Amino acid sequence: MTRARATFQTQFFVAALTATILALGVAGILFSGTMRRQVDDQIESTLVAETRLAAELLSRTAPLPTIPELQDEAIRIGELLSARVTFIAEDGRVVGDSFEKLSDLASMENHARRPEVVEARASGLGRSRRSSASVKMDMLYAAVPVKHPTIAFVRVAVPLTDVGHQVQTVLTATGTALGLALVGAAAIAWLFSIRISQRVRLIAQVAQRYESGDLTPPRLGFGDDELGTVARALDQSVQEVGRRLAEQARDRARTEAILAGMVEGVIVVDAQGRLQLVNDAAKLMLKLRDVSIGRQYSETIRVPAIADLVAEVLLGHRPEALQLSPPRDPSRAIMARAAPAAGSAEYGVILVLHDITDLKRADQIRRDFVANVSHELRTPLTAIRGYVEALSEDDANSDDRRRFLEIIGRQTLRMERLVKDLLRLARLDAGQETLDLVACDTRLLVQGVVDDLESAAEERRQRLDVTIAAEAAVVRADPAKLHDALRNLVANAITYSPEQSTIRVEATPVDGRMTLSVSDQGPGIPEEDLSRVFERFYRVDKSRARDPGGTGLGLAIVKHLVELHGGAVRVENREDGGAKFTIALLMAIVCSLAGCTRAPAPPPQSVSSSGPLRIERDTSPAGPITAQPQLTASGGGVILSWQASDAGDTTLMFAERTDTGWSPAKTVVSRRDLFANWADLPSVMRMSNGDLVAHWMQDTDPAAEAYDLRLATSSDGGRTWSAPFSPHHDGTKSEHGFASLFEASGGSLGLVWLDGRSMKETGLRTAMFDREWTQLSEDAIDTRVCDCCPTAVAVTASGPIVAFRGRTDDETRDISVSRLVDETWTDPVTVHHDKWHLNGCPVNGPALSASGRDAAVAWFTAPQDEGHVFVAFSQNAGTTFGAPVRVDESGSLGRVDVELMPDGSAMVSWIELAGKQATFMVRRVERSGGRSAATTVTTLGTNRSSVYPRMARRGNEIIFAWTDPDSLSVQTATTRVVP
Ligand code: ADP
């Protein structure tokens, strides 16, 4: 990289320098040639002019009769002209020469044949360049005739060395100028090469970044020249390609999510027979372990019938659907359909696999059911008919008649029981029996069953032994229905176990569930029948030879009733003989007992004594058409923020609740591009020095749901706000939201948010600012988290902790926490392994609250498709959390909030969901697991899709805020609590 950069810069510099040298060299040569000639011509013409002047001068001077006088005149003119001046007589004799001594004149050679003299005689002017025989040097001569009695010609000569000297002077000056120009040009070329190479380097870096998959556009521009234009064009193409790739990836992810979520198995093979896609359901159904995508399908699909099906479609046939059992699993049935994959020029194959085991089973059950009902009815009907016929015959005596009538009565009773059971099952199937859940005293409930069946047991001299564990003293159930279920099990035990045996009824807590079991000392149930005894009409003894009077529907009704409670019933054979039926129900932790048929029992120990709260509706400071309430608490009070919509603009506003109630509402920001999402809530928070900090979101690309986080601060109570700033600087048009602000130690501002800059997955990031709002850091806490569940932060005595919904590779979306320890966020730890697998985001974040080293986290989860809310406590600043305590009543939509109370308990709020009705509820949960009665803050009706209620504490006052779905306005309520 460095080498390439140096080379480009040097190459550019060398090229520019060479061009400059060449240009300057050629210019120098041309210039010096011209200059030389010009100087030469100048000197020559000066010499000629001087010679003419000397001739003119001599023609005007008096005749100089003697040689010495002539010599003196020559010397005088020679000195005046700084040249050699020679006077030549008509015959060629030299009569004066400024360069010769007087004595030497006589011996001088005759000059009549000197070229300049010859030329002067002929044309009036003679010029010559040659070596002087007299003075022995190269000279430039000019000679002209003179009108003088003794001098015929005057000749002026300058040494050629003088001429060269003058030319040299000019050339030196030219050379110096060229040298300076060269240095200047070199410097300019160097600077220019640095600038160009920097830009080329920027473009190369951007290209390299693009290559590595990071399509963040460069923050610096490319410039306005051709290089910039090319770079910009390439950048735009890459961004476009990136956008399309992201779109494709989104489409692919969506398709994969759809395929992964399908219960049908899907296999796609291309026209060449290469495997293109196998979804999870297909892998599971065909028990495919090694799936070789891109290889021939026959390498992966080892089931011959299915491989043949694919082959037939590849050959252009339309084969019928196929029914088969998966390898090594004859109990299951799969329907395989293969069809050509349309939509491409070359047809491949789409193979769809349906698991029809349940369908077949249901069909079988239906057929069995009809056969069983007919059979069950036929037996008593045949008996009744026979005895009615016998009665109608005259020879029956009165004893017989009484016996026949008794039999008819018994059979009628049996039919009546059967019809009653069938009707009850039909009601249960149709969901017509609803639960009336109350907390019941387990002992009273079991006693009720024992009382009912005591006489039957006594008849068979059997003993009913009841044991209730202290922890299972209370069961939350519909007492009548649980009574029926337990009664059925005990009745069966009495029927099927031998006389004088013991039947044991036990209530114990197991794995957080409350179990009610009935064990007997009867024959037990053959292993192969264990899984089927809960089916309708299923009887172990199919001969019905020994008719214990049952309908074969009892256990089916038990199963229904228990499942209606959200529980499960199972059967096993005891090691020392006999069957054991167990009903497992959710543990009940409630405040009072009600609804049981017997006298009320004292409240059990695990029940909290605090009663329901008194909720007081309050005049909300937010006006109409407001939404997204958020509450933040500080030493000063609680701040409620919300967004108001008006004429296309969205405004973030807030009011503060102090001892005197709500302050007047103030505006933080009002913009057209303020991002509004029912679960991504902006906030306003007061720092301990009194400053306010607000955060909100601004659209950057609404089509792509891209938006940025913006922060602003106010030091005058919200009258004026600073210029907004962002905690992130990635420059991508992606999700930046679900932020939680907090004040870290030393009064610095921290925040965490969900960040979609990687385009592939959403990460959790954090930033810190000092008291002057200068950004100190920006880090990633987790690179893969659930994409749109709100985050939560609380500050413990040991530093801040953040709670968020995590996301593992297998799409488990449980709640994780990370702590800031020694300026580093710890690796996220799962609060509780709910094992909620979900291909998508439930938009349901956790809530956190902390005080000292105590912390509470509340969250929503639905691993078995039943939504519930839990709270867990930590006493070591969030390092570990205790066992979760269930918070909701019977089912929840989540959207939780939590406030730790001074006594270590937690106020938890949530949306309870019963039927289609949603209710915003709150209750206090103690660390021990005790729960107060649930109190309704407000009912939300059925239109609750965009309600995300919030809660905050101000001393003894708990404040609630939510968006009323009917009036579309933020509402508030308060309650006073004993701290
Ligand atoms: P039924 O009315 O015939 O008792 P259930 O649905 O209550 O019908 O029971 C189904 C079958 O399960 C019974 O026919 C019996 O074979 C078997 N079964 C039920 N309870 C027991 C038990 N405690 N011991 C042995 N077998 C039992």
Image (cartoon, helix red, strand yellow):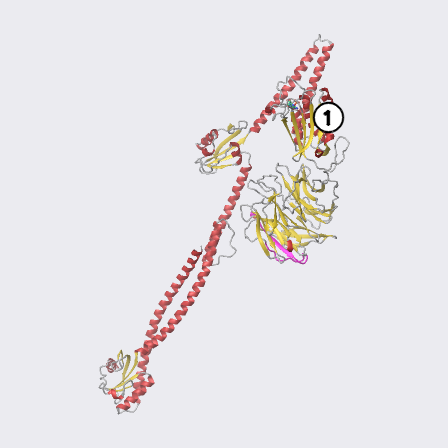
Q: Quadrant of the N terminus?
A: bottom left
Which residue in the protein does label 1 denote? Answer: 450
Of 953 and 215, nearer the camera is 953
Q: Is residue 905 left or right of residue 3?
A: right
Residue 466: percent from left, percent from top: 71, 28
Residue 958 percent location from the top left of the image = 72, 47
Residue at 68% across / 35% down in the picture?
Answer: 587
Q: Secondary structure at mark 1?
A: helix
> In the figure, is residue 68 to the left or right of 350?
left
Q: Amino acid at mark 1?
A: Val
| Ligand 1: quadrant of the figure | top right
State which region is magenta.
704-726
Instruction: Examine the structure image and report whether residue 672 is included in the region drawn in magenta.
Output: no
Q: Is residue 963 visible?
A: no
Residue reaching furthest to the right: 599
In magenta segment, residue 716: yes
* Figure quadrant of residue 686: bottom right
Image height of 716 relative to 95, above or below: above
688 relative to 815, above or below: below
